[in-house]
Amino acid sequence: MSETIFTGGRVFRGLRDAPGVPGGAGGGFAEALLVRDGRVAAVGTRDDVTGAAGAGARRVALDGRVVVPGLVEAHMHLLPYGLGLSQVNLRPDDGVRTLEELLRRVAAQAATLPRGAWLLGRGYDHLVLDVARHPTAEELQRAAPDNPVWVVRTCGHMGVASTAALRIAELDAAVPDPEGGAIGREAGQLTGLLQERAQVLVRGRIPVPDEAGLVAAIEAAGRDLASRGFTAATDMNVGATAGLVEIEAYRRALREGRLHQRMWQVLAADPGGIADAAWDVGLRPGREDPMLCWAAVKTFADGSAGGLTAAFREPYLPGGTGILCYDDATHREVLAHHHRRGWQLAIHAIGDAAIEQVLSAMEAADTPEAPVAGRRHRIEHCGFVDADQRARMKARGILPVPQPVFIHEFGEVYRRVLGDARAAASYPMRTWLHEGHHPSASSDSPVSSVDPFGNLDAMLSRRTVAGTVIGPDETLTVEEAVHCQTWCGAWSQFAEERRGTLEPGMLADLAVLSRDIFRQPEAVRHARAEITLRGGAVAFDRHGELGGD
């Protein structure tokens, strides 16, 4: 037997009497935890737990730290995150708040690249830049005259191509806007800005890594997530970067022991995606391995609020109501097609008009032969939702999969483009939780920071990057916030009977945090994971307490 005892701190078993959670009372805190052969063997008082262990059990002295269930990253883009670790970081929280700094970083990267090699950057926010606009194709060209450049806004729904990149993509001012996308123009000339589905015009010309490069990116992202306490994650648009080879890359990562989270995979199903092609070569919903589940398909209904492309019923303050990527009839047909095949639907919708389109399409797909109830279809983001839509989601068990960290990173943008009232009502975590929706908190990384403690802090405070508190009635307790990032994530992956709490018999997916965040909620943002176990095996060990890396 392989046994490990954790004592000397507290163990968060799970949220006691959580709204809508089957099984009734449970959870709360314990003094000690015993892991045996990959599962929780005992949890309770120190004496009871140590008495249940064998003489050779490894021991971890918590010294006042806390153990929580393994964190679940229910909505992120793991492969793009891994690839992005080698791209130019243009995020505001990394210091890119002026156009000059953005261009300086592009120029510095260009100096390291061969002539003609593509230069890729990610994470800028034009609304944070001192010029309050996107960079232009000409500006990027001057910064990197010998390289085609493509930089993506933080939301991932738009980017800017340099003049050389536009030339390679054979784009000029006469090119019409594609359906569901927009090409930026000014005074009859292209600005370089490509929004929504127009991005593929340039992205399709960028060379993609081979299978070995994809596996390396998967491994790099997984190691990073393990160091943050994550034991389960998602790749929300598999195939969007490199096509069907991404499936083989994940299978190879699994075979070679380079997959570090339990993966819940969501196939790209928009035009150019791989969902139908994957079906044609035999991929079906289900588990290939406890570490790798091909589970869902994803389409986009709209864009991002910060980019003014999320679709709303009422206009943005600057004007316009955003972009719907499909007409109603097309989206109904697409979602019904994948629903009948047995896939979980995981559909991007941020604005209330897009949420309405997606919810109506899911309702239309609900038939006696293929009922929606029990399928746990998901509306990804679901940021600006009304009471009627919430009631209809609850009636069919359709889940919101929100990103509370958006409140911190983009809350000031919401206030500016939507007004205080709509901003305050966005991502209503407390309402969702107490209505029994099981909102699985996530980051949408690399759109936002993957740091789970920033996400937890956003649920506790709803404080923007400028310090403004928006929607204070929607704040959560630490216990509720951790529940949303653990058990609710497991629920979205049909795994709540195996993980998400630390009760006897559950998988030993857990994280030891550097401080007891339940007693120090004001310091949540400064916590970190120090040990991560997945199935009782060491996935990360910051100080070598269990002999890990």
Image (cartoon, helix red, strand yellow):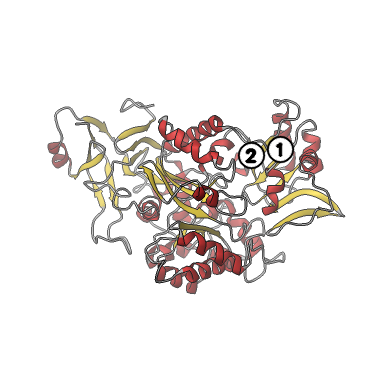
Placement of the C terminus among the 4 image quadrants? top left
Query: Nearest the camera: 206 or 315?
Result: 206
Secondary structure under the numbered disc 1 in the rendered image: helix
Residue 436 x %, y %? 37, 65
Q: CA distance from mark 2 to mark 1?
A: 8 Å
Mark positioned earlier in the residue sequence (2 or 1):
2
Q: Is residue 488 left or right of residue 122?
A: left
Placement of the N terminus among the 4 image quadrants? top left
Query: Nearest the camera: 242 or 542?
Result: 242
Query: Nearest the camera: 42 or 220?
Result: 220
Mark 2 is on which residue type? Gly
- The residue furthest right is 187
Q: Does 471 sit above or below residue 135?
A: below
Q: Does 359 sit above or below residue 104?
A: below
Asked if the residue under mark 1 is in contact with the one under mark 2, i.e. CB atoms within 8 Å, the reply is: yes
Residue 540 x %, y %? 38, 32
Which numbered disc covers residue 101? 1
Identify the residue position indicated by label 2 in the image: 95
